[in-house]
Image: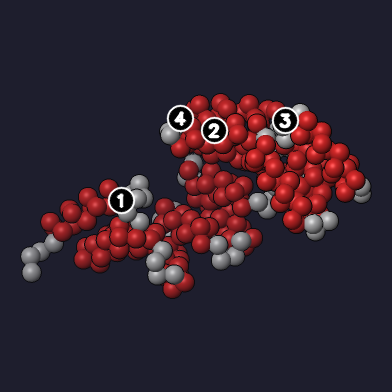
Amino acid sequence: MLLAILPVYNSIKLADKYVVTYLDAHDTYYPAATMSFRDAHFHRKEIDQARHWEDQLAVRSTDYFLLRGSEILRLNGSYAAAAEEQLKIVTKFPYWTEPRAMFAVNLMTLGQYAKAKPQIDTCLMLQPYDKKNLVNLYSYYRDIQDWSSAVREVARAEELYPGDVEIRTDRMLIFYRANDQMAAQAMADELLEQDSLLPFPYLVKGLLADRSQSPAKAIGFYQRFVELAPKEPEVPKIQQRIDSLKIALPSQ
């Protein structure tokens, strides 16, 4: 990324005007040029100008529109088609991490973990402290059930993003899936102390109560999860478990 900044760093105010004229004349905004000017302005602490260039990428770049189209394919469940489109962009712009990170996610969804890992590693090489790249790394280890690596990497992500609710929630879920029940319980309690409306700590507490043969407690925690997150994909299965536990409960 430094090499992308150097050509425009010293005379960027002069270059801005000419580059904008050129890009406008060709009716497109190229990601490489756009990100170079964005990063150059950012390093000069000219934040408004940096954001302007980034906004222009989203508004004017045909490649960006293609990337957004691939995301629509993913959301519609067409993971293979989305990955195919993202591979085209990755091949064209190898230093643009956003499509590479999205490509890695789709590969993992398709179960192609061996192909996903090099994409994640490349993203981390290019942007080692970017949150989405750190999340992809511990998600990779979680999905292949390498629990020691998953715990290590999610802890590292939390160190870099202290207090981040998404990462802390993922850490709690990884503890649970790694069968570290005490750590999962402690994380759930900490998260609820921070915010009592977070749904997944209730799910974990319900699962732990269920495992410890405490059906009444499990039902209460499960129901709270369903109330707070009715659209989560886990809800139908949890609702079935609530119903079965209620049937098994001794009559009062």
Residue 177 appears in view: yes
Q: Earlier in the sequence, mark 2 or mark 4?
A: 2
Residue denoted by label 4: 78
Give amino acid for label 2: Gly
Q: Find disc 2 in the rendering and name its residue.
A: 69
Q: Nearer the viewer, mark 2 or mark 1?
A: 2
Please rate how many residues cluster around mark 2, counting C-alpha atoms within 10 Å: few if below 14, some from 14 to 19, many from 20: some
210 over 109 or under it: above or below = below
Give the quarter of the image for residue 118. Answer: top right
- Rendered location of residue 64, percent (x, y): 63, 36
| Type of amino acid under label 4 | Ser
Looking at the rendering, in which quadrant would you find the C terminus? Answer: bottom left
CA distance separating discs 2 and 4: 11 Å
Query: Which numbered disc covers residue 235?
Result: 1
Q: How is the image coloured?
A: secondary structure
Q: Secondary structure at mark 4?
A: loop
Please indicate whether residue 108 sits to the left or right of residue 8 in the image: left
Look at label 1 and name its amino acid: Val
Q: Are marks 4 and 3 in contact (CB under 8 Å)?
A: no
Question: Measured along the vertical axis of the image, is residue 84 above or below residue 167?
Answer: above
Residue 28 appears in which quarter of the rendering? top right
Of the two numbered discs 4 and 3 in the rendering, the one whose residue sits closer to the viewer: 3
Tell me the amino acid under the disc marked 3: Asp
Q: Residue at x 75, y 40 (%)?
A: 34
* Residue ID for mark 3: 27
Mark 4 or 3, nearer chain start: 3
Label 3: element kind: loop
